[in-house]
Amino acid sequence: MAFMKKYLLPIGGLFLAYFFYSAHDEFRPEMLQGKKVIVTGASKGIGEEIAYQLSKMGAHVVVTARSKETLQKVVSHCLELGAASAHSIAGTMEDMTFAEQFVVQAGKLMGGLDMLILNHITNTSMSLFNNDIHHVRKSMEVNFLSYVVLSVAALPMLKQSSGSIVVVSSLAGKMANPLIAPYSASKFALDGFFSSIRTEYSITKVNVSITLCFLGLINTETAMKAISGIYDDASGPAPKDQCALEIIKGGALRQEEIYYGNIPWVAFLLRNPGRKFMEFLNLKSYNMDKFKTN
């Protein structure tokens, strides 16, 4: 008890104060001017809006999704909005070979990479889990495993540019939600993997930031259709254009997590400083020699 009063409580108080009140740098759109950015799942919804916001800021963008024709329209609009350059590469993230080759090809088109924004998901619907293992596997492969493949392929370029990985997740990856178990599992997996990798990068001095974006209900056509007659959020959906901007801001400012939606206090309730504090204490038990790289 004396040890706790003397050491743990003061340390914990300082940690929590820093966690909640430390100021972030101010975002400026020119931070993205000339930056080379990949956006996945960019044929519609949040991904499409991210591509447009980046274009307004003068970034180079390479977008991907399954529909070649839709992507071509997105690229045309990106150029109209002022993108330094815009390209599209169509394919499915069910194919891990495509995912890996896509990053390499995108890097060649732009001459490098500063930011990787991972946003795509497989089709899902709100229903009771009916023992469909195939759907669980597909959700994990597309919503999680392909994110890992893409980030691994991008890492050499991101190391060179001291770049950023931005992972678009969901509040369903922070709290239990009925009717979307496979989707929720894949989003929880993103938090576990990328938060762990962020810690490894910090210890091994890899200057690549990882931002996890936990989103509430956003007014995309896909989301509105999925919840129709099933889910009624009294606060209403948040706008997708502002959501896209917040995602870009989080990546540009190298924030660890961002929360966006119309639910009051969501960041305060789910950010979980207790977990951060326990991770900090737990790290003290590791043999740091195991983190040495050749």
Image (tube, grey):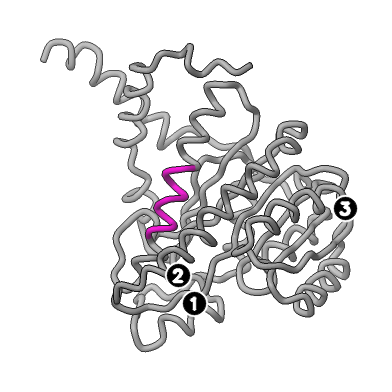
Q: What residue would you read off at disc 1?
A: 223
Residue appearing at x 38%, y 58% in the figure: 185
How packed is label 2: few (under 14 Cα within 10 Å), some, or many (20 or more)? Answer: many
For mark 2, give the secondary structure: loop
What amino acid type should be assigned to the residue bearing mark 2? Leu
Amino acid tagged 3: Leu
Viewer-proximal residue, 16 or 180?
180
Mark 1 or mark 2: which comes first in sequence?
2
Q: Could you tell me the amino acid type at mark 1?
A: Ala
Within 10 Å of disc 1 (Cα), the crowding (few <14, some 14-19, many 20+) is some
The residue under label 3 is 109
Vertical position of residue 172 compared to residue 291: above or below: below
Residue 192 on the magenta segment: yes
Does 173 appear above or below 205? Answer: below
Q: Is residue 165 left or right of residue 179?
A: right
Give residue 279's quadrant in the image.
top left
User: Start and end of the magenta stretch?
Assistant: 185-193
- Mark 1 and mark 2: Cα distance apart in space: 7 Å
Can you identify the residue that label 2 sits on? 217
The residue at the far left in this view is 1
- Mark 3 → mark 2, Cα distance in angstroms: 34 Å
Main SS of the magenta segment? Answer: helix
The C terminus - image quarter: top right
**Visible residue check, residue 59:** no
